[in-house]
Image (tube, helix red, strand yellow):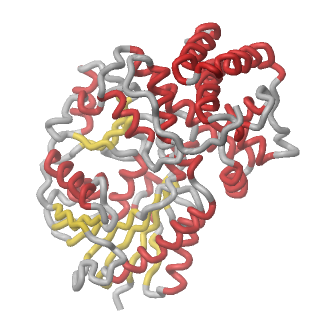
Amino acid sequence: MLRSMSKSKPAIQATSSPRQAAYTTLQRLVNSDLHADDLIDQELSHNQLQGPDRGLFAELAFGVLRRQGSLDHYLKQLVQQPLERLELPVLLLLRLGLYQLRYLDRVPSHAAVHATVELTNVILPRAKGLINGVLRSYLRQQESLTLPDPAQQPVAWLAAAYSLPGWLAEQWLQQFPQSEAAGLAAASTEIPPLTLRVNSLRTTRNALLERLQAAEFIAEPCRFAPEGIQILQRCQITSLPGFTEGLFMVQDEASQLVAHLLAPQAGQQILDMCAAPGGKATHLAQLMNDQGCVTATDLNARRIRRICESAERLGLTSIQAVAGDALGNDYLEGMQFDRILLDAPCSGLGVIRRNPEAKWRLTPAEISRCAARQRLLIDAAAARLKPGGVLVYATCSTAVEEDEAVIKDFLSRNPEFVVENGAQFFPEWADLFDNSGYLRAWPHRHGTDGFFAARLKRIDR
């Protein structure tokens, strides 16, 4: 098994086997820019997986991605050759089998080994002996497998124990004490809840909660977001009561807070610069009572259609969705806005519990490239803001380079802007704001995605 892990096309199509479907999904993700949740939804849409198999498939695919670093750490102690020299199918099959043995209590060990070997017989028959041998070795040796010493090798320990790339483990240890970095890493491996934002122009949170509970969905109000509801079980979004009626939008709680921080007023001219898929744009229109204008722009025309579709389903008419390059010379030429939201494209480190494949694709160089683009975007936003106006800069990143450093650089070059402490506007959210007045939501502290937001005011001189 000495072939390199080169990109390969999936050999398996939609199947009634949850393990085979998980293998196919993981294979398609290698060296791809596709998202795991999109591929999982594609597989489920074939309707060849039924009942509990649908849940097992999603658990296996997402679970292997969430725990990949830990799985590989243990595999290195079980496989006699370097993992990078294994054929890609062999490595994926080993991860699938080991994930079931180590993390799925409801799958008996003998069944997990047998099912993985049988799948190997379909995928790569000559690897059956290796797969069977490694998984049975794990069962014999699991108590003797070790992690790095957290005192002597804190980065290696955090990476192996909580499934992180080494560079991210090092970054979080620079931001937090070891115990809190571990808490953040642990929270980032958990399955996040499905969070809804109630369309307050058509219903109330209590009314929608009652409908959800009457339909036997386990639901509860969010801690911070006043329109937020968490669904505490797996479900299809389109099957939820009120979807076709436009009573809610799927949106994480931390993301919901950003529109409130901008605090748009009815009748104002608002710009959402990087608006797709439309969660924040529709929230802004909702907070304005659908009075005024929200100009929602994005580079991709296809994603612009998603904004329009969401606005139509929610019954919103104040959104004007426009395809455009925010860094282009003719971007919204001559237009000025009362308030601007820049939810800047970023590394997505704050949402790796939702997109676990991202942590294995990202590099420090990619974060630096994101930060360079973010500095250009915030300059473009500032050029479109009226004197006295408010600009909110936000990312779903945990990286200081993409967040505080971008704001510090911007303020050093634009003395007419000042930071407004969000805690002064939202004292009930005091726990969410740091000493600089920036909003910082964390999975391990607040149960939300990781999010950063700064509210900046342009002084009217």
Give x and y (percent) for residue 265.
Answer: 23, 66
Determine which quarter of the picture holds residue 116.
top right
Tell me what residue is drawn at x 22 percent, y 81 percent.
335
- Left or right for 209, reference 103: left
- One can see residue 120 in this view: yes
Q: Which residue lies furthest to the bottom in this view?
A: 461
Q: Name the quarter where the N terminus is drawn.
A: top right
Give x and y (percent) for residue 418.
Answer: 46, 79
Q: Which residue lies furthest to the right in this view?
A: 152
Give x and y (percent) for residue 303.
Answer: 27, 55
Give the camera-side residue of 142 and 29. 29
- Residue 433's place in the image compared with 154, above or below, is below
Tell me what residue is drawn at x 25 percent, y 56 percent.
302
Tell me what residue is drawn at x 19 percent, y 33 percent.
242
Tell me what residue is drawn at x 49 percent, y 26 percent.
59
Q: Name the quarter where the C terminus is drawn.
A: bottom left
Determine which quarter of the picture holds residue 327.
bottom left
Give the camera-side residue of 194 and 257. 194
Q: How many labels does the image show?
A: 0
- Residue 21's place in the image compared with 200, above or below, is above
Give x and y (percent) for residue 140.
Answer: 79, 13
